[in-house]
Image (cartoon, grey):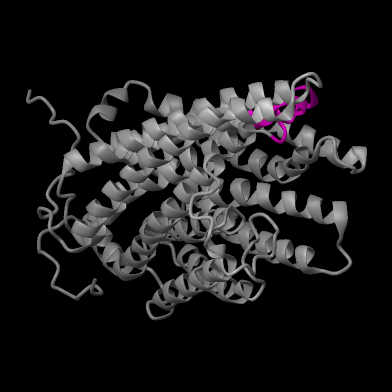
Amino acid sequence: MTPAVAQPLPEGLPGDRLSRIQIDRSCRQTVVWYMVSAVAWLLAGSLLALLASIKMHTPGFLADADWLTFGRVRPAHLSTMIYGWGSMAGVGVLLWLQARLSRVRLPLPLLLPVTVVIWNLAVLYGTVRILQGASTGIEWLEFPVEVLAFIGFCMAVIIVASVLMFVRRQVKHTYVSQWYLFGAVLWFPFLYILGVVLSEAGDVRGVAKAAANWWFAHNVLGLWFTPIGLATAYYMIPKVIGRPVHSYHLSLLGFWTLAIFYNWAGTHHLIGGPLPAWLVTVGIVGSMMMFIPVITVAVNHHLTMAGNFHHLRTSPTLRFVVVAAMSYTVVSFQGSLTALRAVNEVSHFTHYTIAHAHLGVYAFFTMMMFGAAYYILPRLMNTEWHSARWIRVHFWATSLGMALYWLGLTWAGWRQGEMMNDPNIPFLAIVEYTKPWLHSRSLAGVLMTIGHVSFAWLVWNLVRQRGAALIGPTLLKRRKSA
């Protein structure tokens, strides 16, 4: 892939469209590199996920290789998906959205592409070290501590670029998407640095370290991925259907209640643990209060979409984004209910929790990034997607795979929890009960991987400009002529 080449702009274009073309040209190299790198890590993470899933029901699979044992493959999968696919796709979308909303060119044209290289090397180094057995053993912070310096430098550059675009913006209005984007770039560095410091500090031990770990892990989803995902939804839905967000004030209510309540919610994962009762109770209360931003966002998105759901038949972007937005509502409701002690005593330490986590990171955030990619990349490459059929394969494979994964493990996990709470049921009987559902988990992983390969094939052809020139969007189904 080559960087953008300066070419004369076509004459006679309206001023606003001329500005968008200039903005997209300034974003092309950095954003495309971030998103293509993310897709590469998505494929690597998918392979590691399949290995980890197979080992859950067939532990002897590739058991002779130390670096492919479950204790290494699982954290390597999680880290590549969080810091490789999720974070790199999120940064690419974040930079493009901020440039478009501010109506300015992407700044730091020499430094931002360098961050792509550094971020990739950091994730590669961290993943290799995990597979070599040098994991920290702290979930979501498995990378060696030295990776912090590299990702920290990249985030510092991204913060500077984001602030510069906002300061130089050509519009007086601050869009709700920008509120969420600023929240993401300002919260994540604080979370990551403090998470690493608390995990590595010698004075933080035992239950204190567990509390710090869950505070970090929960907030990475809620204060890094969620703001980027919601900013994307607030931009893409109105853009595709051609109408403004239903209520700007509801949008702000959703943002500020997310900012206030979400950071308290992580400790509900430690219900029943040897922690102070007030600390766990604060987590439960924070989780219950999350109904406010979630319902606010759901109502705002639904009223914006009202009368326009027919666009789901034709628009790839809208189809992925709406599914992601609906998943955000479901996973948030499920998460708040799981914080209740009566629910938690059944669901804790079961596959139910794993299903819930994937509904958030995958069905919400990953599907949202897919939708964003289908909108952004053609505009950056000035080329359309070469095949609507492959887009349909991507959508249905990932959607059905995620549905099978979540429904199967949610049902099995709840039943598993009930059986574990019954002292008359032998533990091995519980293990035998879960095995068929673990096979369905692997099948779901195969379906999602088929979708990922389809998406990678589409992106590969796009960056090689094998599609048609950008005239109109690639539609999943041709609209009937009037």
* Residue in front for this viewpoint, 176 or 263: 263
Q: What stretch of residues is rendered in magenta? A: 334-349
User: Which of 467 and 145 lies nearest the eye of the viewer?
Assistant: 145
Give x and y (percent) for residue 87.
Answer: 50, 58
Q: Could you tell me if residue 14 is visible in this image?
A: yes
As displayed, is residue 345 above or below residue 86?
above
- Residue 418: image location, x then y, percent: 72, 21
Dominant SS of magenta comes to helix
Q: Is residue 152 left or right of residue 54?
A: right
Q: Is residue 89 left or right of residue 465?
A: right
- Name which residue lies at 64% across and 62% down: 142
Q: Residue at x 62, y 59 (%)?
A: 188
User: Residue 477: percent from the left, percent from the top?
Assistant: 16, 31
Q: Quadrant of residue 433?
A: top right
Task: Please determine whether, in this image, residue 448 is positioned above or below residue 308.
Answer: below
Name the residue at 45% across, 70% down. Answer: 120
